Image (cartoon, rainbow, N blue to C red):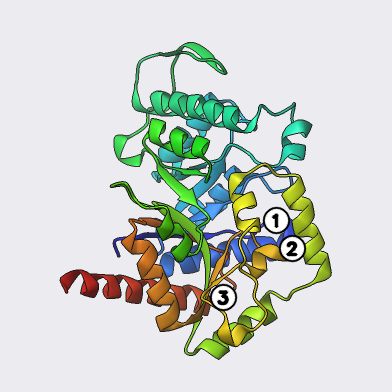
């Protein structure tokens, strides 16, 4: 497939230790089995350290790429570069980085006080530039920035060029878009409905380079929606939790999704794009729900806008991994046929 597909690892706070480790191993092994390129590992104040999770994934797989969510508040850029080069040296494997500026104000305050939203992206750019410089030169690195200053800093072990990490930046704001352009890295967004996205126009550029979504596709429309509502029930507690998260986040994507009307009640007339799981705090991304053809058709439209990478929500079963891969293959075949007409 031309599009790069990643799964998502579960959050450690949602299960006990034994179940969490069992699910990590299952998803890693099955993601590799079905041809996914890698898997995203969340990082925030509540969760197990993503680098420890990365080590477990590397030990359970042979080529699956761990994508570590990375924000500057947790460690110095030299420490990140050291971890990456050490993984390459010990495991002979590469990883990916999902660059995030941090959106939950209470978390940032607890760690020493946030800078404002747009300035966090300026800091993220400096942070990433230092990591990139350390990983790509054997000479000492000097960097004089607003947020970071280093002088003649050298990294060991040396980093093999073929194992240099892939970089992705998450965000929907203008500041995020500007940061991704400055760094030359792919932007990952929680997508709007394709109809809304298309209104923005392209100006010669891709509408969206990468997306994070959930996929629930079954043989027919009603079967898919029945399972969707069973898996993600509408609850008052979930709605309250979502509203609280909305108040404590200044992330542009959270505001944008919260303002979408994606939680209709009549599932037999529901469009494929659905925000029910997001609006009731089950997960943080929109879902595409419907028959294989319905979901594949929706995905093909995102691919047609220039989407190159998709991060899939945490898969609940092996069947989910298999059916999602089938849908993406069908979407790509559909797009190729359209291009030949």
The residue that disc 2 covers is 15
Task: Check if mark 3's residue and mark 1's residue have beta carbons within 8 Å.
Answer: no
At x 45%, y 65%, the residue is 195
- The answer to whether 164 appears left or right of 190 in the picture is left
Determine the secondary structure under disc 1.
helix
**Disc 2 residue crowd, few under 14, some 14–19, many 20+, Cα 10 Å:** few
The residue that disc 1 covers is 12
Quadrant housing the C terminus = bottom left
Residue 190's spot in the image, x, y percent?
Answer: 53, 55
At x 61%, y 57%, the residue is 257
Residue furthest front in the image: 199
**Disc 1 residue crowd, few under 14, some 14–19, many 20+, Cα 10 Å:** some
**Sequence-wise first label, 3 or 1:** 1
Alpha carbons under labels 2 and 1: distance apart: 6 Å
**Sequence-wise first label, 3 or 2:** 2
- The answer to whether 45 appears left or right of 300 in the picture is right
Alpha carbons under labels 3 and 1: distance apart: 17 Å
Residue furthest left in the image: 340
Task: Check if mark 2's residue and mark 1's residue have beta carbons within 8 Å.
Answer: yes
Residue 226 vs residue 1, the one in the foreground: 226
Residue 48 vs residue 201, the one in the foreground: 201
The residue that disc 3 covers is 317
């Amino acid at each position: 497939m031309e599009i790069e597909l990643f799964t998502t690892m579960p959050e450690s706070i949602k299960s006990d230790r034994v179940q969490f480790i069992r699910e990590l191993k299952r998803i890693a092994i099955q993601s590799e089995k079905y041809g996914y390129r890698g898997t995203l590992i969340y990082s925030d104040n509540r969760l197990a350290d993503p680098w420890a999770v990365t080590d477990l994934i590397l030990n359970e797989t042979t080529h699956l790429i761990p994508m570590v969510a990375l924000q500057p508040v947790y460690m110095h850029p030299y420490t990140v570069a050291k971890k990456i080069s050490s993984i390459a040296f010990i495991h002979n494997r590469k990883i990916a980085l999902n660059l995030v500026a941090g959106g939950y104000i209470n978390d940032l305050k607890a760690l020493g006080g946030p800078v404002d939203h747009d300035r966090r992206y300026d800091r993220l750019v400096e942070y990433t530039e230092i990591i990139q410089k350390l990983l790509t030169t054997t000479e000492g690195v000097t960097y004089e920035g607003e947020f970071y200053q280093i002088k003649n800093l050298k990294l060991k072990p040396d980093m093999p060029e073929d194992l240099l990490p892939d970089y992705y930046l998450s965000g929907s704001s203008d500041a995020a878009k500007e940061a991704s352009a400055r760094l030359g890295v792919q932007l990952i967004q929680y997508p709007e409905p394709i109809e809304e996205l298309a209104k923005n126009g392209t100006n010669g550029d891709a509408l969206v380079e990468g997306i994070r979504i959930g996929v629930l596709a079954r043989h027919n429309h009603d079967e898919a929606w029945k399972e969707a509502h069973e898996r993600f029930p509408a609850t008052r507690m979930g709605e309250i939790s979502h509203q609280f998260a909305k108040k404590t986040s200044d992330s542009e994507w959270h505001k944008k999704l919260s303002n979408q009307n994606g939680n209709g009640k009549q599932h037999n007339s529901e469009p494929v794009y659905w925000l029910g799981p997001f609006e009731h705090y089950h997960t943080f991304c929109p879902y595409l729900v419907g028959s294989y053809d319905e979901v594949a058709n929706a995905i093909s439209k995102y691919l047609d806008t220039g989407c190159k990478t998709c991060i899939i929500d945490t898969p609940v079963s092996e069947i989910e991994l298999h059916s999602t891969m089938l849908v993406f293959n069908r979407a790509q075949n559909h797009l190729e046929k359209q291009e030949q007409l």
